[in-house]
Amino acid sequence: MRLIRLLTLFLALVGAARADSADDIARIHTEAIGGKQRMNLLRTLRARGLVNIGDRVLTFLLIAERPNRLRMETQAQGRRLIQGTDGVAPPWQLDPDANPPRVTRLEGEEAREFAADAEFDDPLVDYVARGYALDYAGETQVDGRRAMRLLVTRRLVDSYQLLLDAETYFILKKIAMRVRGAREVRIETVYDDFRPVAGVILPHRYVVSADGRPLHETVLEAVEPNAPVPEDSFTPPVIITVPH
């Protein structure tokens, strides 16, 4: 019986240590990228950039506002697509070049991923208040660099891994398993080219792959902090059809 009690105590202590380690990593990460005071002063972002998809290049304009409002306008070969969310209603999509222009609601996995991308801060900032749970899962290597592995879960629905540089505490990679069709696919996002924006360190390059196969690369070319945002940026437009 004493052995059982000792084992129970040991497992409890290990669990507590893991939780404390995850909390410490999140706290140090928040300070490393600028600290909560600077982050709270950063209210909006306006960014322009490129998305490379194989031999195709898309341009985009991104407008983001705290806490979870996002508008993304992409353009390629003369065609435009606008997606947005006000953080309350379901994300939406506008095809302004259709005849007539068409507004639709994003659904399923696409809607969940867009809503997650709309969060202004990364998952480690104020993670408890925002509904995230973290678990430290040991160390690993990312391109020869020592990295810490965190398991991230939100509302028992979404889960993935974040790998942080053991020296800078920047997030280097996100690993998520996603169902695509009839099979599960390993989606990896690599973060690179870290630069300060109004005192907050943000990655300016994202590379996404599926099962090791490159999907697309996103490059931020110009980022304007605290840019003015038109009031109707995040709500879907009302399309009025005029009868002929």
Image (cartoon, rainbow, N blue to C red):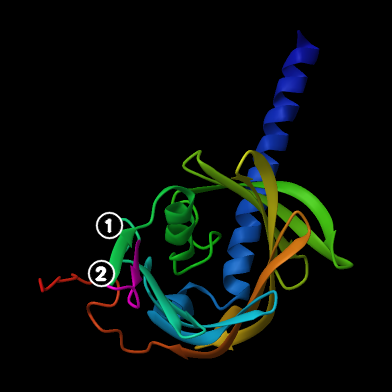
Residue 235: give x, y in percent of width and height: 25, 69
The amino acid sitting under disc 1 is Ala
What span is in magenta?
Answer: 92-99
Mark 1 and mark 2 in contact (Cβ < 8 Å)? Answer: yes
Relative depth, front residue between 126 and 191 = 191
State whether residue 145 appears in this view: yes
User: Most extreme residue toward the front, as rendered?
Assistant: 244
Mark sitting earlier along the chain (2/1)? 1
Q: Which residue is mark 2?
A: 235
State whether residue 71 appears in this view: no
Q: Residue at x 71, y 21 (%)?
A: 8
Residue 229: give x, y in percent of width and height: 30, 84
Q: Residue at x 63, y 38 (%)?
A: 182
User: Most extreme residue toward the top, as rendered?
Assistant: 1
Above or below, comparing residue 241 to residue 194 in the picture? above
- Neighbourhood count class around disc 2 (C-alpha, 10 Å): few under 14, some 14–19, many 20 upward: many
Above or below, comparing residue 4 to residue 62 in the picture? above
> Which element carries disc 1, helix, strand or loop?
loop
Relative depth, front residue between 241 and 148 = 241
Q: Which residue is mark 1?
A: 89
The amino acid sitting under disc 2 is Thr
> Which element carries disc 2, helix, strand or loop?
loop
Residue 52: give x, y in percent of width and height: 65, 78
Tell me the quadrant of the picture where the N terminus can be found. top right
Q: Residue at x 73, y 73 (%)?
A: 168
- Neighbourhood count class around disc 1 (C-alpha, 10 Å): few under 14, some 14–19, many 20 upward: few
On the rendered structure, is 240 left or right of 134? Answer: left
Tell me the quadrant of the picture where the C terminus can be found. bottom left
Residue 96: give x, y in percent of width and height: 32, 76
